[in-house]
Image (cartoon, rainbow, N blue to C red):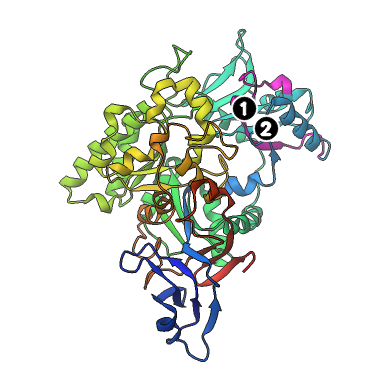
Amino acid sequence: MIERILYNGNIITQDDKQKRVSAIAISGGHILAIGMDDDILELATADTKKENLEGQTVIPGLIDAHLHWQWTARSLMEVDVFEVPDKQVALQRVAERVAMVAPGEWITGHGWSQAYWQDNAFPTAADLDAVAPDNPVYLRAKSGHAVWVNSVALKIAGITADTADPEGGQIARDESGKPTGILFEKASELVFRHIPHPSVEEIAAQMKQAQKLALASGLTGFHDFDGPRCFQALQLLHERGELALRVVKNINDPHIHHAHELGIRWGFGNDWLRIGGLKIFADGALGPRTALMVEPYEGEPHNTGIRVTEKDEMLQLVRIASLAGMPSTIHAIGDLAVRDVLDVYEAVRKEEAAHGIKPEQRRHRIEHVQLIHPADKHRLAELNIIASMQPIHATSDYVMANQYWGDRCEFAYNPRIQLDQGVVVAFGSDSPIDPFDPIPNIFAAVTRRRADGSPGVDGWYPQNRISIAEAVRGFTIGAAYAAGMEDRQGKISPGYLADLVVLDRDIFKIPSDELLDVKVMATMVDGKWRYEGVM
């Protein structure tokens, strides 16, 4: 029986056989048929619900191929210091939270970046001490690769001038060797381990709130890169029938051996919650200048970043995962990190070929690919590696990138290079590093501009702009392929999952300047309306 028919719509299918139709027949969470109104309405029975789209545009559900779901959900409850224009605003918001909590209670927040401040200088523990003398404070940088803490937090963690830098991390110090209050990369774990963790029930409750916002933005699924407790909370929601987004759960390398011991392979699960790949960090990020570089940062002749995972260790991790039936997905920001990862994948691809494993059976990814060396720009195509990229990072980071990477920026945040070579590009937001709303991400990819119009009408390195169709494809077909779900996700086609987004205008026909005005009218997942704004 056909449960629901949507008709009188402008439906963009991304199915080459029928690119635009006006009606869809849906049953059991799947699309049964697509076509024109008369043909599809003929299929209705007395029990079929018929809904008039009144000419509105429908596209396949949008998928965020890279975010941190637990972190995103938690950030909604924390002190908001996201892209604050100066340090004083951040301190004021911390002071306001201090007034609301008891002495000794932890205060956490996310989103500051010294790159948005006039002096571009990192803040200090002393700055926070002035407004939070009795509460430990832990504020993650926008990049997620540095944290700003106060003296109470340093004391709780036992971090002093005598504390050695941990492997893969660095404690910022003043001229006397005293910690300044900034912790880079894995050094942040020295403090983080002392913060009381919410229960799985609390995490699930936070996720339910975040899920409402994600559905309202047009998301129908995402690929997650958080830890095991995130997976526990997602399973809890799924068990209760409260999970309304389709999730691919990647496994970070500290925990991957558990999956190997259990024999869990890529794709294990169902269409709601399934296992992705092994996640590894090759380097840091641009914001704290810990991304691993071939040549030093501009103005910092002795700084080439931090190698978070040694190349030999990466190779061993990827090799073991591949033999265990799991692809890898490796964070690489700097051009040397990207090169290291490509070298690892090249070696593993040869081993896979010797075992008769085809590239499509191990859909290895590089996360971010923010800067690629010109000598390496062809290698993702040659090795059949997925480029998992975040378009909005280009516009949020361009000022820093110009300052610290200079002319190298021609090859930075550049999906154009990969698309032109036929590389599968999957788009995401890296939320909460940047907001998960896909429409601003599409705008950034197409215009290479911020919402305020900067850096100018042509955008940042305008030759690297992509089309609206290419941007939407990155959030649909590209993300679906990266998940191994391209046979049922990313298109509006018979047999595919009934995951749809209704927009207030035809996103493919409007001028790019109007993209930020596009509104999500409704979002359907599994044949059910999960968000209905003004439908």
Q: Eyeballing the image, is 2 above or below 281?
A: below
The answer, for residue 104, to whether it is visible in the render is yes
Mark sitting on residue 126: none
Q: Nearer the viewer, residue 274 or 376?
A: 376
What is the total number of numbered labels drawn onto the structure image? 2
Rendered location of residue 406, percent (x, y): 44, 20
Local packing at callout 2 (Cα closer than 10 Å; few below 14, some 14-19, many 20+) is some
Q: What residue did someone put label 2 on?
A: 84
> Going by the picture, which residue comes out furthest to the top?
176
Q: Nearer the viewer, residue 426 or 57?
A: 57
Local packing at callout 1 (Cα closer than 10 Å; few below 14, some 14-19, many 20+) is some
- What amino acid type is highlighted by mark number 2? Val
Q: Which residues are magenta?
A: 101-127
Question: In which quadrant of the rendered view does residue 269 lie?
Answer: bottom left
- The residue depicted at 52 percent of the width and 53 percent of the height is 231
Rendered location of residue 350, percent (x, y): 19, 41
